[in-house]
Image (cartoon, rainbow, N blue to C red):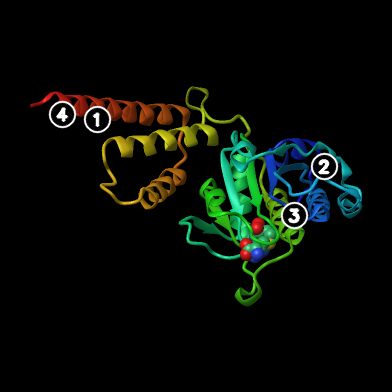
């Protein structure tokens, strides 16, 4: 039988797992999600632009998880809420056109725990009516789908949080003690924010070298994002890639200037 989790688990791996609720419409669902988290030993609730402030209904439905509600930071955007995360997984009720790897809940839970040994990670949930936008999903490394009936696939928000939190709990209970010494200090894993900085420069560079040739940039950028998000970029690797891009931008500038000067 698995040993019960102790206090250090709550502040260790579990303490690095963030449940992010984006644009929630009903405060009661935030309360119910907090309750679902607390039953499974998770405590880091983060809100992104909720439609309404927390109210009596939220506190009532948290049924004793008020501490999670009171401690929950509120961000204006998903990007801000996950800026320091190593891994960001977006939960979707149906598959979208966004090209993302899709994980089942148990695989998502073990992936989260693997990264949470050393860094913050996030599990992101969308709006009750419309879920996550494609732009928000683009910020995620992979999507997670609870294999519900395709003809009636959408769980209540707090129910979806419960299923994922349960899988995280099961994975934590099953896991052998993890080495939390973290990555090599000379080559720390890049944060989400650092990787996003690289993507912005990559998009600028593709424009500067006329890579798209009149096509819309979206499709190429989506594929490139997918490629790089699949890899586990380190700070040094991001620095190297940005150095390459800076040189490409410089050469493009020189070529433009030479073109202007030539007769
Ligand atoms: N009508 C919305 C569903 C929103 S349900 C849509 O079609 O996207 C609110 C949130 O709960 C979703 O954004 C998602 O994060 C989560 N959720 C609901 N059902 C889910 C499922 N089957 N798998 C994974 N997440 C789910």
CB contact under 8 Å: marks 3 and 2: no
What residue does disc 1 label? 252
Mark 3–mark 4 distance (CA, rounded to whole Å)? 54 Å
Label located before the other in sequence (3 or 2) = 3
In percent of width and height, residue 142 lies at: 53, 52
Mark 2–mark 1 distance (CA, rounded to whole Å)? 51 Å
Mark 2 sits near ligand 1, with its Cβ under 8 Å away:
no
Q: Is residue 88 visible?
A: yes
Q: Which mark is residue 259?
A: 4
Which quadrant of the view contains residue 78?
top right
* Residue in the foreground of this view, choosing between 228 and 223: 223
Give the farthest residue toward the left.
Answer: 263
Mark 3–mark 2 distance (CA, rounded to whole Å)? 18 Å
Which quadrant of the view contains residue 10?
top right
In percent of width and height, residue 68 lies at: 82, 42
Label located before the other in sequence (4 or 1) = 1
In percent of width and height, residue 207 lies at: 32, 39
Q: Which of the image's four quarters has the N terminus?
A: bottom right
Q: Which mark is residue 68?
A: 2
**Residue ID at (86%, 40%):** 67
**Crowdedness of circle 2 by 10 Å Cα count: few (<14), some, many (20+)?**
many
What residue does disc 3 label? 25
Mark 1–mark 3 distance (CA, rounded to whole Å)? 47 Å
**Residue ID at (88%, 44%):** 66
Q: Is residue 191 visible?
A: no
**Residue ID at (53%, 59%):** 102
Q: Secondary structure at mark 2?
A: helix
Label located before the other in sequence (3 or 4) = 3
């Amino acid at each position: 039988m698995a040993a019960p989790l102790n206090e250090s688990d709550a502040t260790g791996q579990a303490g690095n797992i963030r449940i992010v609720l984006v644009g929630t419409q009903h405060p009661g669902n935030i309360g119910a999600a907090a309750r679902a988290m607390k039953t499974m030993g998770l405590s880091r609730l983060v809100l992104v632009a909720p439609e309404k402030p927390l109210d009596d209904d939220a506190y009532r439905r948290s049924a004793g998880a008020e501490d999670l509600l009171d401690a929950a930071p509120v961000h204006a955007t998903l990007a801000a809420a996950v800026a320091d995360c190593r891994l960001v997984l977006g939960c979707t009720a149906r598959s979208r056109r966004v090209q993302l790897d899709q994980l089942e809940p148990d695989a998502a839970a073990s992936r989260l725990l693997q990264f949470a040994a050393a860094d913050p990670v996030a599990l992101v949930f969308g709006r009750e009516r419309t879920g996550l936008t494609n732009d928000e999903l683009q910020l995620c490394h992979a999507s997670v789908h609870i294999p519900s009936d395709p003809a009636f696939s959408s769980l209540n928000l707090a129910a979806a949080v419960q299923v994922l939190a349960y899988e995280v709990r099961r994975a934590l209970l099953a896991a052998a003690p993890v080495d939390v010494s973290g990555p090599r200090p000379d080559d720390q894993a890049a944060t989400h924010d650092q990787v996003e900085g690289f993507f912005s420069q990559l998009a600028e560079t593709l424009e500067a070298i006329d890579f798209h040739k009149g096509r819309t940039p979206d499709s190429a950028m989506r594929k490139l994002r997918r490629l790089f998000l699949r890899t586990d970029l380190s700070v040094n690797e991001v620095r190297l890639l940005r150095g390459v891009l800076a040189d490409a931008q410089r050469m493009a500038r020189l070529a433009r200037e030479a073109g202007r000067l030539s007769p």
